[in-house]
Amino acid sequence: MQLLETTFWSTGGSRHGMAERLGFSKSKANALIAGLVDQGLLAESGLQKSSGGRRAENLQLNVALGVLIGIDIGATSIDVAVLGPDLAVLAHHSEPADVRDGPGVLLARVRTLMRELLTRCGSSAKEVIGIGIGVPGPVNFENGQLVNPPLMPAWDSFSIRDYLREDYAAPVFVDNDVNLMALGELWRLQRSLSNFLVIKVGTGIGCGIVCHGEVYRGAAGAAGDVGHICVDQEGPRCHCGNLGCVEVMAAGPAITRMAVAAAEAGQSTALAECLRAHGTIEALDVGHASREGDAAANAIIQRAGSLIGQMLASVVNFFNPSHVFIGGGITRIGPLFLASVRQSVYQRSLALSTRHLEIQYTPLGTQGGLIGAGVLAMQETLRVRGVAP
């Protein structure tokens, strides 16, 4: 299965390239590849670009293996997709949802969407070879259960695996949503970066940690729960019970609260107009007002970015990553937020930690969680039982 994993992570390659990556002789690699092609596990998918000689055949996992299902459950939305073994999205649906409604309500809807999307791309439940699910809370990866999730208490110890096992024989893998974003970036990069962080800023704040080319989950699955790092001991009380967590002071709901306060205090005509027209203000509205030059909106975004940067500086000093990718709904707020995070990190971190550090929005954008769910499903299915359904 090592050859199948290498093919998946390299998003294809030539026979010669596979032999080099694995340290195999050409004859050994050719024999193994021929066997896997005969079994229908690998397929040749056209010629690679010429490098001077005869063009090599490109190898990839055989699309006839079946399909994967990726599910990204956020605090306020659900995304479900059917993907090929090469992670091409075959069908996709996204809709608003409230994770506080509990697993019964949300997973019933997810199960319906899974059936509809499989039908849309002409597949059946029997053709599903793996299911990957991301959830916004700490997960015990071994048993796939959430552990005291602050944003979704009704889900504590609920077995998502058992729930989906009624309809699908395929293995089900559950992980924290930010870990899946990190897996998605790792796959996009073909494991070319070994030590980086992915920060998700939405309703909450979390961190996916890639260490030595693998997602690091910690002893109990709670690694990366950076949203509850304190940035102000006199700050407001967080839903976790502590004071001044960066999540309660700088995530999406905090930006909304600051915007409503600014509108009601007469500090921003743009935000006041938005509040009058819609009865509420979203983080995206703050971003729009900022791009129009609204001073109060600018100050709110800079404060949120600065607080997240303050938290991130400590993490950067501790872990010394090469890159920090920022994702989640907050990325749509605009460039000022990213600039504020960068300024705060560079100001507060040690020079050695930031000398070659790059901080940017995630290139995968809103699809990062879904792609990561597909990576999880394919990777773990290969590890656990090969790819035979």
Image: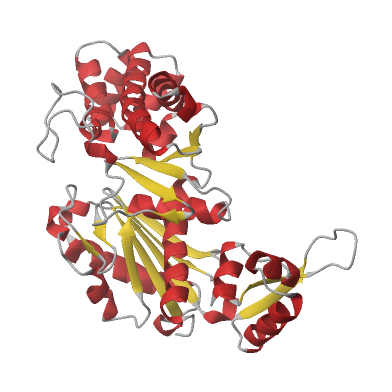
Q: Is residue 328 visible?
A: no
Residue situated furthest right in the rendering: 53
Q: Percent from the top left, x then y, of residue 238?
A: 14, 35
In the foreground, 365 or 242: 242
Q: Residue at x 15, y 54 (%)?
A: 148
Q: Is residue 111 left or right of residue 46?
A: left
Question: Vertically, is 173 above or below 217?
Answer: below
Residue situated furthest left in the rendering: 241
Q: Is residue 236 visible?
A: yes
Which quarter of the rendering shows the C terminus?
A: bottom left
In the foreground, 243 or 80: 243
In the foreground, 370 or 14: 14
Q: Is residue 313 left or right of residue 256?
A: right
For the image shown, how many numbered marks are present on the structure? Answer: 0
Q: Percent from the top left, x then y, of residue 376?
A: 42, 64
Question: Vertically, is 190 above or below 172?
Answer: above
Q: Residue at x 27, y 51 (%)?
A: 136
Q: Percent from the top left, x then y, of residue 73?
A: 31, 56
Model colouring: secondary structure
In the figure, residue 69 lies in which quadrant? bottom left
Q: Percent from the top left, x then y, of residue 10?
A: 61, 62
Q: Residue at x 70, y 84 (%)?
A: 31
Q: Is residue 52 left or right of residue 327?
A: right
Question: Vertically, is 31 above or below 373?
Answer: below
In the figure, residue 28 lies in which quadrant? bottom right
Question: Vertically, is 271 above or below 109?
Answer: above
Q: Is residue 331 left or right of residue 138?
A: right
